[in-house]
Image (cartoon, rainbow, N blue to C red):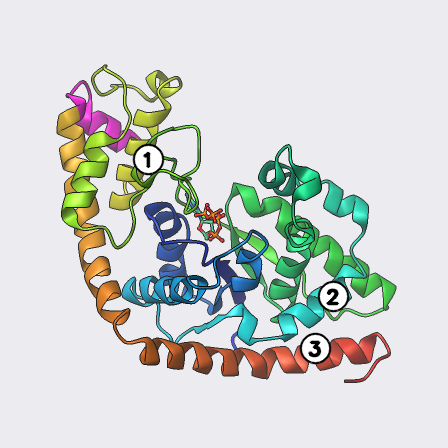
Amino acid sequence: MQKEIIFSGVQPTGEIHLGNYLGAISQFVENQEKFHCIYSIVDLHAITVWQDPNIIRSQIYSVLSVFLASGLSSEKNIIFNQSKVSQHSELAWILGCTARIGWLNRMTQFKDKAGKNRENASVGLYTYPILMAADILLYKSTHVPVGEDQKQHLELARDIAHKFNTDYKTEYFVMPEPLFNKSTRVMSLRDGTKKMSKSDESNYSRILMTDSNDEIKLKIKKAKTDSMNMPDDEKNLSDRPEINNLINIYSASMAIEKKEVINHFASKEISFFKNELTDVLIDIIEPIARETIKLLDDKNYLETILIDGANKAQVISNKSISEVYEIIGLRR
Ligand code: AQP
């Protein structure tokens, strides 16, 4: 195995959107050339919020199809769904005995996701970062791609690894380092202050990686903006979150600097910019959508990929979990 190992996951909580693609999957594709990568469809994380048993399986297949259609190789990487590898849950229990309640109480994502109805949130949502630590540490991952919202969870994984190593006088767990994404956070097309999300009620808030060209056109046309023309300076964007978001999407999609986008469209009408943005998005999404839809037609093939990935993941995770049991004085 190569020295540097990446672990990252995507929850099958809905259809993959442009935010998931620009913020995660396109980076996964780049990373597969440089690292040994383990990409998991983290279904056990997904059920921390209720998921319909009748659709979660098809959502797993749909995430996998977008992975493959975007260029992720099942040969170069280990790709599987988390529930197929029970060592994730086993290690999460052990690490849950290392993590401290005070540490979990500081996790801001739980506070955001549970909202005002905290007493009614699942215990799984609260202990989610421990399962994430297990995902990472099980494979001795050296790097974890993180956006702003996952930084705190990675820090927690490092704290858990450090405490485990100290408690058991070992250097067993590797300290995972963050790998910061280049691209910006993609925001909702209906509200530029809210993240584009699979679970947003409005279909018009997100562009799916399986949207048709007409749907992309319509969603960009309907995307909320203001009545001014395009800005000619980045400073003028501070109170225009929706236009700022569309410019960020253009910049990330074209892999060019934001400044360049602003200069190119300075003072032009928003409708002109929207048309250009639509073309850019269609160029990226059309081939991925076509391939995704084709792959979704062959569930046996998709299942084979997941089983094969899980077998490879188990070779590593089985060894790790046995070693961990040995360290804590138990035997499997
Ligand atoms: N809007 C976004 N912009 C950039 N990156 C994003 N990611 C998610 N939304 C955006 C990145 O996609 C990866 C997979 O995310 P996830 O499925 O694990 O969970 P999430 O961040 O909670 O994604 P969603 O789409 O918002 O799902 P729901 O609605 O279920 O919560 C991660 O790397 C994430 O940073």
Crowding near the residue tagged with mark 3, few <14, some 14–19, many ≥20 C-alpha atoms within 10 Å = many
The quadrant of the picture occupied by the C terminus is bottom right
Q: Which picture quadrant has residue 237?
A: top left
Residue on which the image places disc 2: 93
170 in relation to 156, above or below: below
Image location (x, y in percent) of residue 252: 31, 42
Front label number (2 vs 3): 2
231 in relation to 188, above or below: above
245 on left or right of 87: left
Which amino acid lies under the numbered mark 1 shown in the image of this protein?
A: Asn
258 on left or right of 7: left
SS category of the residue bearing label 1: helix
Image location (x, y in percent) of residue 265: 18, 26
Q: Which mark is residue 248?
A: 1
Q: Is residue 264 magenta?
A: yes
Residue 145 visible in the shown view:
yes
SS category of the residue bearing label 3: helix
SS category of the residue bearing label 2: helix
Marks 2 and 3 sit apart, C-alpha to C-alpha, by 11 Å
Q: Are marks 3 and 1 in contact (CB under 8 Å)?
A: no
Residue on which the image places disc 3: 321
Q: Which picture quadrant has residue 246?
A: top left
195 on left or right of 105: left
Among the two numbered marks 2 and 1 on one chain, the one whose residue lies closer to the N terminus: 2
Which residue does the image show at 80% across and 44% down from the upper left? 102
Among the two numbered marks 3 and 1 on one chain, the one whose residue lies closer to the N terminus: 1
Q: Is residue 244 magenta?
A: no
Which amino acid lies under the numbered mark 3 shown in the image of this protein?
A: Ile
Q: Are marks 2 and 1 in contact (CB under 8 Å)?
A: no
178 in relation to 59, above or below: above
Q: Which residues are magenta?
A: 259-270
